[in-house]
Image: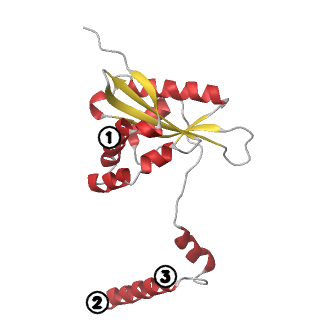
Amino acid sequence: MSRAPIVVSAVEPDDADCLVGLWLASRVEQGASLDAASRHAADGRVTSALRRPETRAFVAKRDEVPLGFVILSERMFGLSDASDVSIDQLYVVKDARRQGVARQLLATAIAHAERAGSERIVSHVPAQDREANRFFARLGFGSSVIRRVTTTGALRRKILGGADVSPFDSVLRRRRTLRAHGRTRSA
């Protein structure tokens, strides 16, 4: 007996329930607590993201059972003339992996990029996710940049060397210094 086909459909902000459930599963799988992920979903993070004009979401289903999703964004990087389609998130539930779900979602990404006139598709994959990195490498995605992230406050402290530091940051720095001195004396 053959399986039912995988059907990929666009997700609208007002009808994001199936996406929210999959997004929660992806967050938990990435190491977030279910409680924290649920709070983010309840405060409308998913639906507000879907309301951004450059963001599109698609869900793959088989027999009306959600199996995975892809979140796409159209972005202009740097001084480029054309926007690229960016795969911000791609997720397939564990039981549905290796069944063509991700390929169907990526085929939808290709169609979206072609409609948008984009010549490139960019994928954001966490460096520590070996399985996802291998998957995208097999499909021809190459590494182009290493994205390093910091907080605004941390960068301010490094750049300004302590000048223009908030009182809160001053207290934190003083506590850390005192703790460090305490450790060296007791050692």
What amino acid is found at the position of numbered circle 2 in the picture?
A: Ser
Up/down of 26 relative to 66, above or below: below
Residue at image position (44%, 23%) is 104
The residue tagged 3 is 169
Q: Position of residue 173 (x, y in %)?
A: 46, 84
Q: Position of residue 69 (x, y in %)?
A: 41, 34
Q: Which of 87 and 115 is in front in this view?
A: 115
Q: Nearer the viewer, residue 46 or 2?
A: 46
- The alpha-carbon separation of the residues under discs 1 and 2 comes to 50 Å
Image disc number at residue 21: 1
Residue at image position (33%, 91%) is 185
What amino acid is found at the position of numbered circle 3 in the picture?
A: Asp
Image disc number at residue 186: 2
Tell me the SS state at disc 1.
helix
| First reached walking from the N terminus: tag 3 or tag 1 | 1
What amino acid is found at the position of numbered circle 1 in the picture?
A: Gly
**Is any part of residue 90 visible from this angle?**
no
**Is any part of residue 106 visible from this angle?**
yes
